[in-house]
Structure formats: structure tokens, C-alpha cells
Amino acid sequence: MALSVAVTNHVTPVIAQSQPYVVGFLPKALLGFFQYATATGNAIRSSWGFAAAAGSGDQRVVYAYAEDANTPTLGIALEEDTPFYRIYNFSGAPNLEESAPLTSFDSGGGGGFTLNHQTLTTGARPFSTLALGGADLTNVKTGKFTLNQSTGAQSVTGVEFQPDCVIFFASAAAAADTLGATQSNSTAMMGWATGSSAQGVAATRVKDSANPSVSRRMQLTNRCIKFLTDAGGQGEAHLTQFTSDGFDLNVDEAAVGAYRVYYIALKGGSYAAGAFNGRTTNGSQTVSGFGSFTPKVVLFLSANQATSSANNAHARRSLGVDANGTRWGGWFGDQDAVNPSNNSHRTVTTKSITMATEGNPTVNAEASITGFGSGSFDLDWTTTNGVANEVMFLAIGDAAAGPPPSEGLAGSSHIIRLPRRKWSF
């Protein structure tokens, strides 16, 4: 048994069409990473998109966007259940530029997935995916729930299995808001948990119609859900346990609105969540001690700052994925307390960690994985700026090998009965 993993970098078509993408096996889960960029490299505007799917009828997407050089600021965000890929801009009003739902996971043609690209204003936009499959991955499901508006325990059920890992993502849209409709404020959060003592979250907020700009960020390594206001928090939770039908949270800070939270739950394979401080000078770095398995892929998440639990100025966040051979790195930033707005984003496929300062932008730190080991991975930092930025990670690998069968008497036969497993869409 093994876990199949593929990080692949793609470009959207320039005409509306159904487009297959090859990953080399039949996926069971698909994560998507994208920004407003029309090419890799630096670009104006702040943008961030993340999607998760367990099948054509089980997919979610979150997208946040802020316009550059505007007075007052222009920021939007959205959540939607159906498309896997969604791009908006803001030219006087929110404008849908690209949309593509996942239509199938494919076993033929080398194995992969198909997107139905329906709306294409520009086309030829880069996006990247992480596909997971193989016999180790037994259950996958996406879902949504409303974070409690009071502190204390909250149970999320209906997953239909006990997860090993859950990834959370949201835009601070209220449960009553129309799915697919843009909301004011470019607000987004992403977090994950592999257990009650292994979780993390990064959150950003760019206030809409502000003069001067109000842009904030926060990163926590003891929470998996966090929503920000202009000066503080407005909803926060941590995982307490996985259950046979989902997971339990403790709401540490009551949500000020009925905020909807998306998730993708995974069972089967090995998972580890942790955090480390990046190098202050160029060179190699080994991150170790997070388990006994050898990762096949690692996700990175950072608010581009030294370890801090404060609500800090400037909305900056890095997200990356690295399979030691193929990788993607994305960054966006929005400067606080300026007029007009000053923001930008960066998309690269040669690094999985990229950090910058908005404007041109100026690249502050970049790294990529050079090797995997037992409970470890090696990084090569090719750009640094003297700051030990805290980076959170989610490592994924094969399931732990079971004990070998016991030896019996010569001539005896043995039947090993495996427990039945339920695949859930």
C-alpha cells in the first residue's frame, strides 16, 4: 500500500472548453492553488485562491482579492461550493473573469482530472494542484459548518469517518450570504490540524472602502481557525479531537458573525503539522523530529513575520506546496495605513516558500525542498533578509507499515483478514 502524490503546474486554456489534466494516477483528493496572475512572477493586486475537492459533487473554493492604487481601498472575497477554480477582479464592481468546476477524476489517459473552463476573460493563467490517491488514502470528504458565536465546545459531524487530517479555509462570509456572491473586505484564512497538539492557522484582512488602508495579518500555531477584524479577532478555534463522524473544536473566541468554514477531511496516510523559524542567511536547513514517516509532499504557510500571536500590520501571507521536484509558491501583500492602496502578489514554480514586501515587490526570502528523510525534510534558502520568519508546515506521506505476520508451524496456513474500509465521496 502507498500514497500517490503529484504536484503539477498548469495553464488555463484561452477558450471555454473541457480540459483534462494528467497527474499519473486516479486522484481521490485534489487541492488547488491560484492567484490573479496571468504569468509566473510579480504582479499588481493582492489575490489568493484555494480549492479542495473529493469529486465532482464535492468541491469548495475560497478567493480573496484587493485592487492596487485605489482610494478608498477595494477588497472582495467569496466562497462557493461548485467551481474548483474561480477568478474575480474589481473594476468599478466585482467581475467574474474565470470559472472552472471539477467534472471528473479520471483513470484513463495516464490518470488525472478534468475541469470545465466556462468563463474565460483572459485565459492562459497559471494554477497548480496537489493530487492525492493510492491505496493508503481510504476516505476523503469536503464540508462546511458555521463557527459558533459563543465560546466552548463545538462538534462537527457528518464526515462519516474519523479523519487523520483536516484542512480549514474560509473568507469570513456569513452562513446566510449567497454562495458565489462576493462580499466586502478581502478577508481569508487557512489552517490545518493533525491532532490536538499539532495545528496552525494564518489569517489576513484587507478592509474595503478604507482611507487610509487597513490591512492586518496573524499566525497561530495552537489554533486551526481564525478570523480577523481591523484591530483584533472575531472568531477563533482549535481542534480538540477527531471523532468517528468528524471532529471536535473548542471555540476560544466567539465569532462575531455566523461565519461559514470550509474543510477537507482526509483519512489514510501519515500526516504531521508543525512550525519552524526560517534561516536568516542563505544556506541549507533541516526540519526534523515530526514523526517516523518520510514525507512525499509538504505544504507551507506563513504570515511573513517572526513568531508572534499579535494582530499585526500589513496583510501578507505565503502558501506553497513541494514534492521535491515539482512545486508551487504563492505570496500576496497589502500595505497598511497608506493612501492609495499598495498591494501585489507573486507566483513561482521554482520555490515553495516565497516572501516579499508589497510594491514591485521586493523578495525577502525564498526556499525549496531538496530532500526528504524519516521525519524530516531539507530546505535550500536562496534568498533571506535577516529575519527568522515563522513557517508552518503540513507533511504528508505513506501510512505506517503494519507489523509483519507472525510465523507459524511448518505446513500451517494463515489467513489475515483486513477490516473493511468505506470509501466516502
Image (cartoon, grey):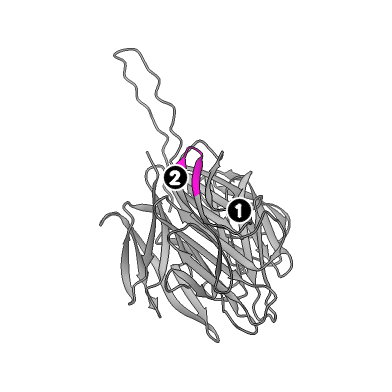
Q: Hey, what amino acid is under mark 2?
A: Gly
Q: Which residues are magenta?
A: 371-379
Give the amino acid at mark 1.
Answer: Thr
Give residue 99's position: percent from left, percent from top: 42, 73
Circle 2 crowding by C-alpha within 10 Å: few under 14, some 14–19, many from 20? some
Q: Tell me the quarter of the image containing the N terminus.
A: top left
Is residue 402 depicted above or below 153 in this figure?
above
Q: First in sequence: mark 2 or mark 1?
A: 1
Name which residue lies at 57% across and 65% down: 356
Residue at position x 47%, y 55% in the image: 321
Marker disc for residue 280: 1
What residue lies at 36% left-to-right and 15% top-to-bottom? 408
Residue pictured at 33% horizontal, 52% vertical = 26
SS label for mark 2? strand
Q: Is residue 93 above or below residue 63?
A: below
> Dot 1: within a 10 Å radius of its alpha carbon, few (fewer than 14), some, or many (20 or more) residues?
some
Callout 1: SS: loop
Q: Residue furthest bottom?
A: 92
Q: Position of residue 187 (x, y in %)?
A: 61, 69
Give the mark toward the camera: 2 or 1: 1
